[in-house]
Image (tube, rainbow, N blue to C red):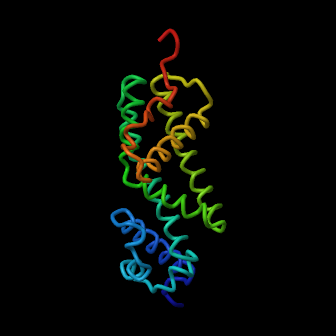
Amino acid sequence: MSTDEPVRARGRRTRARILDQAAALFAVQDYAAVSVAEIARSAGAHPHQVTYYFGSKDGLFVQAAFLLLLREARRLEPIGLRQRTPATFRAAVARTTLTLPAVPVAVRAMSISRARPDLQRLAQHRLAILFRQAEHYLARVLDRHDWTLDRPIEVEVRTFWSAVLGARLISESGYGGHSSDIDVAGVLTIHSKVGN
């Protein structure tokens, strides 16, 4: 009996390693500056494995960008949970979200997927995961502080993330100003319940 790792398990491990290394590289370098060969080398893989597992550099980039965004979005949770009032919550979460390094990477990934129908479903799926993750988090915050919203939680989350991504898109497109010039906190309707 062989003690070698099964082929499928080895393939999953290689795929995960490529994705992790790509995410690390794209977190610090622009999309154009990172080559498939560099990703493969840093993952201890062969360049053809990138295309085998992800179809293309674009496919890998979209997956890596959303992996980064999901990881960074989880880091927002303690910041929001520490806030004592709805106003400080709105301000802290908006300010911190706008500065997440993964936000412009995700904007670029959505731009690529828009032009690539074969990647649109992947981007939509990853956005759905982001929204669900944010809904669960916001539900915990609301329950913990006995706060409420003026609209359904799924609308609150989508509106917030749309404002964040849109603000970064505007600032990255060369329009004068910064993403912080947009009142992202103002799109949130979180407030104390009447009588509290």
Residue 151: percent from left, percent from top:
61, 27
Q: Residue at x 49, y 87 (%)?
A: 4
Q: Which is more toward the observer, 165 or 83?
A: 165
Q: Residue at x 54, y 80 (%)?
A: 51
**Vertical relation: 102 (above or below) 26:** above
Residue 196: percent from left, percent from top:
47, 12
Relative to 50, 29 lies left or right: left
Q: Which is more toward the observer, 23 or 110?
A: 110
Q: Residue at x 41, y 78 (%)?
A: 35
Outermost residue to the bottom:
1
Q: Work out which quarter of the rendered image holds the N terminus and state it.
A: bottom right
**Vertical relation: 73 (above or below) 125:** above
Residue 49: percent from left, percent from top:
51, 83
Outermost residue to the top:
195
**Vertical relation: 117 (above or below) 88:** below
Q: Which is more toward the observer, 70 or 96?
A: 96
Residue 167: percent from left, percent from top:
45, 44
Relative to 87, 123 lies left or right: right
